Amino acid sequence: MSYIRKPAVRHPSLQPNKLGLTVRDYEGAMSTLCAGCGHDSITAAIIRTFYEMDIPPHRVAKLSGIGCSSKTPTYFISGAHGFNSAHGRMAAIASGANAANRDLCYIGVSGDGDSLSIGLGHLCHAIRRNLHMLYIIENNGVYGLTKGQFSASTDIGSKSKKGEVNTMPPIDPVLVAISQGASFVARGFSGDKEQLVPLLKTGLHHKGFALVDVISPCVTFNDHEGSTKSYVHTRKHALPLLESDFVPMAEEITISYPEGEARTVRLHDGSTVRFRKVAKDYDPTDRKAVLAYLEEQQLSGEIPTGLLFIDEEAVEMHEEAKTVDGPLTDVPFSDLCPGSAALEKLMSAYR
Amino acid sequence: MTSEQKPEVRINDFAFKLANVNGTGSASANGLLMQAIFRMGIPVSGKNLFPSNIQGLPTWYEVRVNKLGRTARTSEYDLMVMMNAETYAADIREVRSGGYILYDSTWPLNKALEREGVHFIGVPLARMCAETFADPRERTLMKNIIYVGVLAALLHIDMDVVKGMLEEKFKKKPALMQSNQKAIWLGYDYAIKNLEHPLPFRLEKMDATKDCILIDGNTATALGAVYAGATVAGWYPITPSTSVLDAFKVFCERYRVDKETGKKKFCIIQAEDELGAVGMVIGAGWAGARAFTSTSGPGISLMSELVGLAYYAEIPAVIVDVQRVGPSTGMPTRTQQGDIMMCAYNSHGDTKHICLYPANPEECFAFSVKSFDLAERFQTPVFMLTDLDIGMNDWVVPRFKWDDNYKPDRGRVLTREEIEALPVYYRYSPADELGVAARTLPGTHPKGAFFTRGSGHNKLGGYTEVPAQYMEVVDRLAEKHRASRDHVPAPIIEKRPGSTFGVLTVGGCDLACREALALLEEQGYKGDFCRVRGFPFNEEVETFLEEHSQVIVVEQNRDAQLRALLVLETRCPKEKLQSILAYGGFPLQASQVVDGVRAKVRLNKKEG
Ligand SMILES: Cc1ncc(C[n+]2csc(CCOP(=O)(O)OP(=O)(O)O)c2C)c(N)n1
Ligand code: SF4
Ligand SMILES: [Mg+2]
């Protein structure tokens, strides 16, 4: 573990954003992860995302489980309330927090162990609920914090540092999420911030559960030859299906694409995501085709990345439950307690 | 007493049992009986002894009527209504000598079942049904209503009351009303014409339930949560706790839906499991809502992991445990107090929790509200432990009252302005005299942001692995728990002049213990009564223990869990405490306490 201060995350210019905050205002405590850990790059992408999106830090709630990945909320947006909860339980805790206050911007950070083993049930059910949050899995195919055991996302044939070969089929969070009815599913790579930041931005604007699986190599336990989650392997096999740009509502679409090569999906809040097609005929709104395609790719060992699936029609938890528009925490007590007269009346029903 | 002797007449003091088949509609008929007696102004209790099954297995319902309000369970049945041929033999054995047995005489009773010294009353219920009703389902259902009619004649249940109840119940279903009315009179008229009536034990109108209601504890608990202003509930179905959330939903739909927009001022999430459920409660508590979950023992086992997180990170949460028989799946439809220890010290590491122990639905309502106040005042999980008997059976209790001046105790939560005024904010410092530090809610103010963690933290909320810093925080948590003892409900203590021993108990043992002490007094055993209502134990419990040289702890579990908790958490020497334990799964009876005390207390032994 290194305790050296990581180089500050630098934005090209330390220009203040619309709130007058600089990128520094979105940083957190010094990282205590291993030098070169993929998770730190994701932290940097998160910082840039929130800064560029002008989100007031105190309106963010950042939650996590337990693991190296789950430590990272300490390393970004120190002005936000954070909750480093228990191993695998973050999705449940986020569900309750969101139920209480729907107006915050929820971001969850988890690991492949946290999300795909101990917390798989909670994850699947948060997806079913279509909980409005950005949920990032920092996927290194290994249990980092407990020193290198295989995780549920380890691929068949992938070798551990000690030389063991995994023979069990992996749980692919992307496939699980889409088959579970997730409304937003993306995959990125910690080594490709230019792709990752727009994915995170779009995810934050998506109304509902936005799952972003980010391949994030563990330099200490899973970056060797024979590992399918190493930097080298990921760079070689990453298959960007679509390149996407996030276009905020207020902004004009300035980039022009050759005819027929771009496709726009409008998000709930009026902003749009523009896809530039890389893989021919890939349609991220066609669930059936997406599933079939991804399954095929998984078998061939390629790692499709990008915004893989989006469904902007899906109904988010509070809409489904018909909860009041504002946070439940803002409803005054007088609106919650029926009072003595109502009780008096009710009591007659128990005669 | 033999059957030849003319038995003395007993008014408003008897018990009867109904043996039914699960899923045949007997529950509503039996409820009707109980409610009719209640409306006649007579203290009454009904215990549903049901199987873990949806249809087909034997199920029983016991009714006890007692003018003095002694309505704990009793197994001294004066009358048995046998509606299940499969259990005839056992049912006949159970009725007291000289008692009565009502059975369906459509089929002759097997000679082998006959018993000396009891009276058999045959009523051809199935035949009467077949002759009156065409629809097979109706035939099954109405058989129950016919025996209600028969019992009305035999026990002097006021038929006007019954009629009134049926009218209320089937106001909107005239067809059902008609069959029910027909069935009830069919039974009543048959009994008047063909049976010796009334029985020597019978009812007479009283005025003892006028200001009372008939309600189960789970409904009361849910109502308390509504009145306390709980907005978020996470839960997972489990007997005997499910009806808490069912009722919460019904009340919320009634009181918490905005008339104009149709939008709801509550959010109920049926979770993936109990761990998820309590996670939601903790998340909601962290975000500033009053939130709760309700479960039973197996669910608490699952929740343990996160209960420790809420304890250590100091997040309010209310957890209702409607106890059932363990270990493991145990007997899901039977009652016990087997989770006392598990809740008091729930989760790994040094953890101690505030626990409340209501004894009846009235206290379920009050303590449910109290739980939220305590959880927020002390920023910690609060357990409210009821049991299947309290939660699922109907009890006669005083009408609930509400004080409109009630203000929820939200504890120490900083407002935007308060945060703004602070030079710097730390989550766990400074603590007040109760050991509680002010918290901030997410979204309030950038300066109020902090990092909640279940990992080692110092008094400023920062990560630590330094022994002294870690200990400083957990020592304060212990202090905080200690301080809460003056805030949990005080024990109920009843003293008798010249008493020589004490009976100390908890929760649903209340009625049986108080009845037992009254009976024991008649036999020369004078004992004082103490029912603890909260953990940590407050000073009054200590005093009670000090004042008595012999204290008998009555509880419904095998391992004397309350006694163990007293040994651990009070100054009382272990030798002073003896146990009466009832853990078979049925609610406690006074006779069990009487027998236990007589075996343990030596008469004319003076207090010293
Ligand atoms: C109930 C429980 N079991 C086990 C652990 C130990 N544990 C801590 S982190 C971890 C695995 C983390 O793996 P992952 O989520 O992939 O995170 P990474 O460290 O790889 O980023 C385990 C098993 C725990 N904290 N809690
Ligand atoms: S062990 Fe692996 S996952 Fe953990 S900090 Fe080090 S490199 Fe990152
Ligand atoms: Mg991992």
Image (cartoon, grey):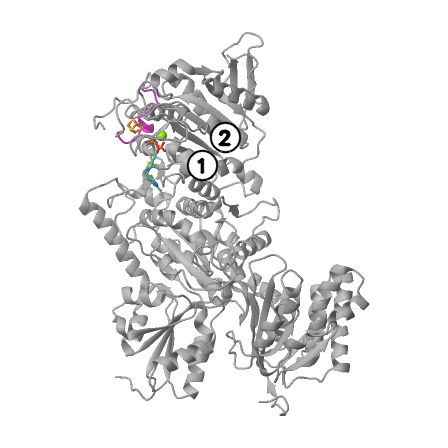
Q: Quadrant of the N terminus of chain A?
A: top left
| Nearer to us in this view, A88 or A298 | A298
Whole-percent x, y for residue A267 in the image = 54, 25
Residue B392: which quarter of the image?
A: bottom right
**Image quarter (top left, top right, bottom left or bottom right) of the C terminus of chain A:** bottom right
Q: Quadrant of residue A136?
A: top left
Residue nearest the viewer, comparing B590 with B219? B590
Query: Can the viewer see residue A155 in this picture?
Result: yes
Task: Say few, some or many: other residues with alpha carbon within 10 Å of mark 2 (under 14 / 14 to 19 / 20 or more).
Answer: some
- Write down the quadrant of residue A168 in the picture: top left
Q: Residues within 10 Å of mark 1 (few under 14, many from 20)?
A: many
Magenta residues, dominant SS class: loop
What's under tag 1, amino acid-wise?
A: Leu
Q: Is A87 located above or below residue B22 in the figure? A: above
Q: Judge from the rendering whether residue B228 lies leftward or rightward of residue B124; answer left or right.
A: left
Residue pushed farthest top? A258
Residue B373 on the magenta span: no
Nearest to the observer: residue B34 or residue B119: B119
- Name the amino acid type tagged 2: Val
What's the distance in space between the residues labelled 1 and 2, CA to CA?
A: 10 Å
Q: Which label's residue is closer to the chain start, 1 or 2?
A: 1
Q: Label 1 marks which chain's residue?
A: A
Mark number displayed over residue A120: 1
Residue A15 in magenta? yes
Above-or-below relation of B504 to A123: below
Which residue is rendered at x = 35% and y = 75% of the image?
B552
Instruction: Point out the stretch of residues depicted in magenta.
Output: A14-30
Q: Residue at x 25, y 30 (%)?
A: A32
Q: x and y percent of residue A154 in the render?
A: 39, 27
Q: Quadrant of ligand 3?
A: top left
Name the residue tied to disc 2: A176
